């Protein structure tokens, strides 16, 4: 088995033993709100603008942080498509209830589809990578789809000890494909807008997650066709433009900060989400799943 640098961020057994000693399952520890309020500047990271994709819709702007560390070939192709303005004027063509929203070229006839420019038509899939040189901050979770789950570079991951892969949590963005594993190239993308379809893990290349504007996607009318595809041109939502952050004028950029996932503060955040101390909770579960943890995002002036 390959060596994996793993940072264990809490130990439920110790928490249970402490509960037995104190005679209570509620610990004198801060709530999630208190943990976030106590964060210091070093607990936040600023995403590279070159990895931020700004997709402008009539309703507003969706911003996606791409993950070149996990899917370098596919991310590079997406960037090429964006910089050559492939997506401008195309559309959101699918909204499947409790599942995904998908966008790309809605043309059905091949001779009517938009050309890819200098971007390759096929890109090798990047379903997973070796855990070598990858540092995973793990969480304790009885996960049904992976032996190990946690975060690496701020993104949710699963692992079997040898391989690691991004997980299909809410807001994650992937490359749509056909039956052939290499039939996707980033020209059609989707975002998870419902329950976490983890059965897709290791079968589709995930390339990032939405940082802001997902509300513009989740509130779209549901498609009435198979798999939630729209059946008429009137149902489509046009994509006004797609730009990489380093091509967006400074005054039009959003300055994001994302909570780091390799710190003690993040460990406390996960613990606060696992053992809920808010007054409303009567019987906190003391358990959590990888897709129940979404690193906080904030904007700064």
Image: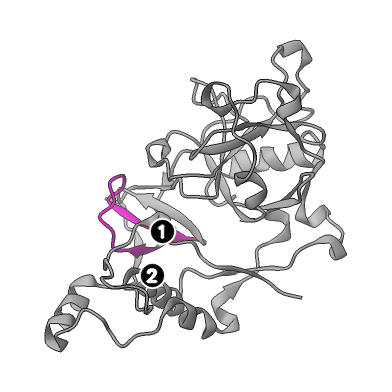
Coordinates of residue 13 in the picture (x, y in percent):
18, 72
| Viewer-proximal residue among 116 and 56 | 56
Q: Quadrant of residue 231?
A: top right
| Viewer-proximal residue among 155 and 28 | 28
Q: Which numbered disc, 2 or 1, marks the residue that appears first in the sequence? A: 2
- Magenta highlight range: 137-152
Is residue 147 shown in magenta?
Answer: yes
User: Residue at image x 38%, y 56%?
Assistant: 290
Circle 2 is placed at which residue position? 273
Is residue 260 shown in magenta?
Answer: no
User: Residue at image x 39%, y 84%?
Assistant: 30
| Viewer-proximal residue among 296 and 31 | 31
- Looking at the image, residue 135 sits to the left or right of residue 252; the answer is left
- Looking at the image, residue 194 sits to the left or right of residue 136; the answer is right
For residue 112, above or below residue 104: above
- Looking at the image, residue 41 sits to the left or right of residue 149; the answer is right
Q: Secondary structure at mark 2?
A: helix
Q: Residues within 10 Å of mark 1 (few under 14, many from 20)?
A: few
Circle 1 is placed at which residue position? 292
Coordinates of residue 91 in the picture (x, y in percent):
73, 32
Coordinates of residue 113 in the picture (x, y in percent):
75, 19
Image marks 2 and 1: residues in contact by CB distance under 8 Å: yes
Visible in this render: residue 186? no
Q: Secondary structure at mark 1?
A: helix
Residue at mark 2 to residue at mark 1: CA–CA distance: 8 Å
* Image quarter hosting the C terminus: bottom right
Visible in this render: residue 63? yes
Coordinates of residue 68 in the picture (x, y in percent):
59, 50
User: Residue at image x 67%, y 48%?
Assistant: 216
């Amino acid at each position: 088995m390959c060596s994996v640098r793993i940072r264990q961020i809490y130990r439920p057994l110790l928490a249970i033993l402490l509960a037995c000693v104190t005679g209570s399952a509620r610990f004198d520890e801060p709530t999630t709100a208190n943990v976030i309020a106590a964060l210091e500047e070093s607990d936040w990271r600023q995403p590279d603008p070159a990895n931020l994709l700004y997709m402008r819709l009539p309703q507003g702007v969706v911003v996606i942080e791409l993950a070149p560390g996990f899917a370098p070939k596919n991310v590079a192709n997406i960037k090429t498509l964006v910089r050559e303005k492939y997506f401008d004027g195309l559309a959101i063509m699918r909204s499947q209830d409790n599942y995904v929203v998908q966008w790309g070229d809605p043309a059905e006839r091949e001779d009517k589809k938009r050309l890819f420019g200098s971007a390759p038509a096929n890109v090798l899939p990047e379903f997973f990578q070796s855990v070598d040189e990858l540092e995973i901050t793990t969480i304790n979770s009885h996960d049904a789809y992976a032996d190990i789950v946690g975060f690496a570079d701020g993104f949710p991951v699963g692992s079997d000890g040898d391989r690691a892969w991004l997980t299909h949590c809410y807001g994650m963005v992937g490359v749509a494909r056909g039956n052939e594993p290499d039939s996707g190239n980033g020209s059609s993308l989707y975002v998870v807008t419902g329950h976490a379809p983890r059965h897709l893990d290791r079968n589709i290349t995930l390339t990032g997650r939405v940082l802001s504007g997902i509300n513009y996607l989740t509130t779209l009318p549901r498609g009435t066709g198979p798999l939630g595809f729209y059946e008429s041109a009137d149902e489509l939502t046009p994509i006004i433009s797609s730009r990489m952050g380093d091509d967006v004028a400074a005054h039009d950029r959003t300055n994001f900060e994302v909570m780091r996932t390799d710190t003690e503060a993040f460990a406390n955040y996960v613990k606060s989400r696992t053992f809920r101390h808010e007054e409303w909770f009567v019987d906190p579960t003391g358990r959590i799943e990888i897709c129940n943890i979404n690193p906080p995002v904030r904007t700064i002036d």
